[in-house]
Amino acid sequence: MLENKVILITGAAGGLGRATALAAARYGAKLALCDLHQAGVDETAEMARALGSEAISAPVDVSAAHEVEAFVKSAAGAFGMLDGAFNNAGVGGTLSRTHMLTEEQWDQTMAVNLKGVWLCMKYEYPYMRREGGGAIVNMASVAGLIGFPMNAVYAASKHGVIGLTKSAAAEYARYNIRVNAVCPGYTDTQMVAAIEDIRPGMVDKTLESVPMRRLGKPEEVAETVCFLLSDRAPFLTGQAIAIDGGLINV
Ligand SMILES: NC(=O)c1ccc[n+]([C@@H]2O[C@H](COP(=O)([O-])OP(=O)(O)OC[C@H]3O[C@@H](n4cnc5c(N)ncnc54)[C@H](O)[C@@H]3O)[C@@H](O)[C@H]2O)c1
């Protein structure tokens, strides 16, 4: 499905980024992987190579413009092009009442989850434009579609990602660059484990209202992302796709 496509993935040291990297490797993609944490992203690249993919990896803070710019340039340089990107890196926000958030907590979540996605698109776009097309998938969340009481900054950042996605999709459609967002519900990664550590029982309580009554699996999100990055979705752009076991419908 992704044979010889060059795909960049941020936040690829674990969780959804790693699962997508490995799925993309199985589908034949060449990978440029980055994360704040070098050891984890190097390990993901090693796992991708074991699956037969060509993969490079580097430490990158997606909230730092110069780091994102340099990484996108090195990725396109290493493979000679950039076909797709999964702008996935993110942080879990702060469990707090809205008015209790500090300015620092607000700025930190926004810098990674929203500005980070924008910076990635900013530097990915010129390569895709030059090559006559591409596909971008941005990581939002069900918290980009509905409110998230006790984590307003996270919800605000993810609603922002969807606004960014729809706007860029409309701008870039004429250049054959598709831009979509994925909106997972609670999915079994370190991020959800951290919520459970801080507020034991919170995840289970949410699952009671999920029609499928379970956490998502990272591989389930990865499959949707690979489809959106592939040529099998040529008329699909500007969408925010929930992968949530039915959560937002009830
Ligand atoms: N797990 C869920 O339930 C869930 C649901 C909806 C959306 N998401 C989103 O999925 C994405 C991946 O999260 P995950 O669940 O795999 O959790 P995770 O914590 O395993 O992965 C997040 C990755 O992003 C990296 N990262 C954090 N800040 C960074 C920065 N400034 N620069 C580069 N990398 C950075 C982390 O090091 C980590 O490897 C996030 O954007 C998250 O908001 C997760």
Image: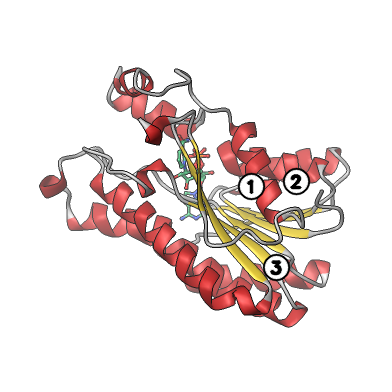
Q: How many marks?
A: 3
User: For the residue carrying disc 3, how many other residues have a C-alpha within 10 Å: few (<14), some (14-19), or many (20+)?
Assistant: many
The residue that appears at 44% across and 18% down in the rendered structure is 213
Residue occupying image coordinates x 53% and y 28%: 216
Give above or below for 89 relative to 215: below
Q: Find disc 1 in the rendering and name its residue.
A: 225
Residue type at numbered disc 1 = Val
- Which-is-in-front pick, marks 2 and 1? 1
Q: Which residue is mark 3?
A: 134
Q: In this rendering, would 97 be left or right of 54?
A: left
- What residue did someone put label 2 on? 24
Give yes or no for contact between labels 2 and 1 (Cβ–Cβ under 8 Å). Answer: yes
Q: Distance from label 1 to label 3 (Cα)? A: 14 Å
Q: Is residue 200 above or below residue 234?
A: above
Give amino acid for label 2.
Answer: Ala
Q: Position of residue 248 (x, y in %)?
A: 38, 36
Q: Amino acid at mark 3?
A: Gly
CB at mark 1 closer than 8 A to ligand 1?
no
Residue 123 is tagged as none
Q: CA distance from mark 2 to mark 1?
A: 9 Å
- Disc 2 to disc 3, how far (Cα)? 15 Å
Colouring mode (rainbow / by chain / secondary structure / one colour): secondary structure
